[in-house]
Image (tube, rainbow, N blue to C red):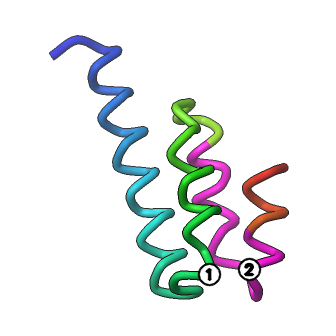
């Protein structure tokens, strides 16, 4: 497996994990935010989001984390 493909796979896994969390925590209200998450392909950015998203106490907090 090429390194680029591996990184892309990890990025997709990170996107999926973030979206699953948003769906579980905020439901349908988070759908626009989930679409935004899937636009990020940079694993480093997605990892930063994953490390912070669990501290979001509201959908507004989640938006702020993802847009930062």
Residue for point 62% across, 50% down:
36
**Relative to residue 61, is residue 28 drawn left or right?**
left
Q: Position of residue 29 (x, y in %)?
A: 62, 81
Question: Which secondary structure dominates the residues rendered in magenta?
Answer: helix
Where's residue 63, x and y in %? 77, 65
Q: Quadrant of residue 32?
A: bottom right
Q: Going by the image, does 37 lie left or right of 17?
A: right
Q: Nearer the viewer, mark 1 or mark 2?
A: 1
Residue at x-position 41% and y-position 63%: 17
Q: Residue at x 30, y 35 (%)?
A: 9
The answer to the question of whether label 1 and label 2 lie on touching residues, with beta carbons closer than 8 A, is yes
Q: Secondary structure at mark 1?
A: helix
- Residue 41, position as x, y percentages in the image: 52, 32
What are the residue bounds of the magenta stretch? 46-62
On-image quarter of the N terminus: top left
Task: Report how far apart the C-alphas of labels 1 and 2 lie in the structure.
Answer: 8 Å
Name the residue beneath numbered marker 2.
59
Q: Is residue 5 above or below residue 45?
A: above
The residue that mark 1 highlights is 29
Residue 34, quarter of picture: bottom right
Looking at the picture, how far across and down is residue 15, in whole percent? Answer: 45, 51
Left/right of residue 2 with respect to residue 37 in the rendered view: left
């Amino acid at each position: 497996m090429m390194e680029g493909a591996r990184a892309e796979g990890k990025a997709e896994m990170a996107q999926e994990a973030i979206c699953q969390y948003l769906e579980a925590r905020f439901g349908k209200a988070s759908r626009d935010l989930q679409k935004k998450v899937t636009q990020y392909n940079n694993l480093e950015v997605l990892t930063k989001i994953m490390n912070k998203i669990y501290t979001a106490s509201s959908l507004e907090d989640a938006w702020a984390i993802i847009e930062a």
